[in-house]
Image (cartoon, rainbow, N blue to C red):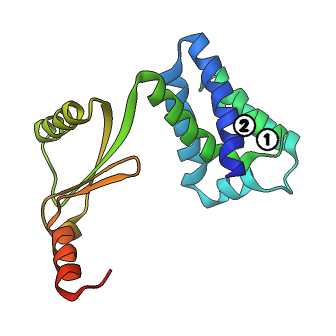
Amino acid sequence: MANETLARRYATAVFSLASDAGSVERVGSELQTILDTIHSDPAILRYFTSPVVNRTEKEQTLLQSLNGKVDDIPLHALLLLVRKRRETLLEELVTEYGKIARSARGVEPLVVMTARELSDGDIRALVDRLERTFGKKFEASVTVDPSLIGGVRIAMGDRVIDGSVSGRLEELTRTLFGSN
């Protein structure tokens, strides 16, 4: 919780700078790319998060690797994390930045899990119906999970709507056998 609060403070500052520069989407995308790159190789991740590696050396490595390739805002946010010995906050910072950016656009995250791949039209129709029903705008991410057997499971924040075959079978089992 403390890390989430601290990451939210950093993300808020980064978002404010990005908003003033008119580059909210670009900064968010570049932060995510930096995070993905660092996490793509265990050796890079160990180097980046190691408390033993000299901070000045890390800063120089990051500057040589990223200068001119990413916007100054995500680069300097990363350098600040290194200077403050808070490299492990990067993932939470990116997550919090995404939440702040979605909120600023008036959009909430929506996770749709399906048993099979859906067409773009089917996904759009489902999202449109949910937006009308709940009076909100959603940004959907879709995952395929064959264990659902059929149907769809939707997560909106802390609310889950389970219309999957496996969910209904679990519900039937609880009803028949009285287990919670």
Q: Position of residue 55 (x, y in %)?
A: 86, 43
Residue drawn 58% across the image and 44% down it: 35
Residue drawn 64% across the image and 32% down it: 11
Q: Which amino acid type is marked by label 2? A: Leu
Under circle 2, the secondary element is helix
Task: Pick the residue in front: 154 or 11.
Answer: 154
Q: Name the residue under label 1.
A: 82
Using a 10 Å C-alpha cutoff, classify the residue at mark 1 as few (fewer than 14 neighbours), some (14 to 19) or many (20 or more). many
Q: Where is residue 49 in the image (x, y as percent from the top left)?
A: 74, 53
Q: Which amino acid type is marked by label 1? A: Val
Q: Name the residue under label 2.
A: 62
Q: Is residue 21 above or below residue 121?
A: above
Q: Position of residue 67 (x, y in %)?
A: 68, 26
Q: Is residue 53 above or below residue 132?
A: below
Under circle 1, the secondary element is helix
State yes or no: discs 2 and 1 in contact (Cβ < 8 Å). yes
Q: In this view, does 103 lie above or below 141?
A: above
Count of marks placed on residues: 2
Q: Which of the two marks, 2 or 1, is nearer to us in this view? A: 1
